[in-house]
Amino acid sequence: MLTQASLYWFTGTISTSFRPCHEYAHHLTRRVRRVDVPTALALVPADLSLPPRSWAERTYNLTRYTDAPRRALRRL
């Protein structure tokens, strides 16, 4: 988590990463109901969140869903 925060901080993009959370909390933007653009989702074992395919399909026009095996992480 520290690595992720450091990347935002040192590249000067920390404020833009907080913007969506701030806008949604203060009702400045609406929640996205549906994204109709064809979307691909790739999950890797090191991701913080590993949503099931059914969750992604609720919001996105999911055309590809890749769940990388744990052994792929060792090759990096």
Image (cartoon, grey):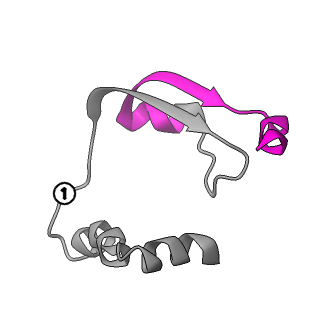
Where residue 54 sits: x, y (%)? 54, 32
Numbered disc 1: secondary structure: loop
Q: Which residue corresponds to the image point at 22% horizontal and 71% vertical from the top-left?
A: 23
The percent position of residue 52, horizontal first and vertical second, equals 61, 37
Q: Is residue 55 visible?
A: yes
Residue lying furthest left in this view?
28
Q: In the image, residue 41 lies at what x, y percent?
A: 51, 34
Q: Which residue is mark 1?
A: 30
Residue pushed farthest top? 63
Q: Nearer the viewer, residue 33 or 41?
A: 41
Query: How many residues crowd mark 1 within 10 Å: few (<14), some (14–19), many (20+)?
Result: few
The residue at the point 70 percent across, 52 percent down is 46
Residue 67 lies in the magenta stretch: yes
Magenta-colored stretch includes residue 26: no
Disc 1 residue type (three-letter): Arg
Q: Quadrant of residue 35?
A: top left
Vertical arrangement, residue 60 with respect to residue 4, above or below? above
**Magenta segment boundaries in residue numbering:** 55-76
Q: Nearer the viewer, residue 57 or 7?
A: 7
Residue 10 percent coordinates (x, y)? 45, 79
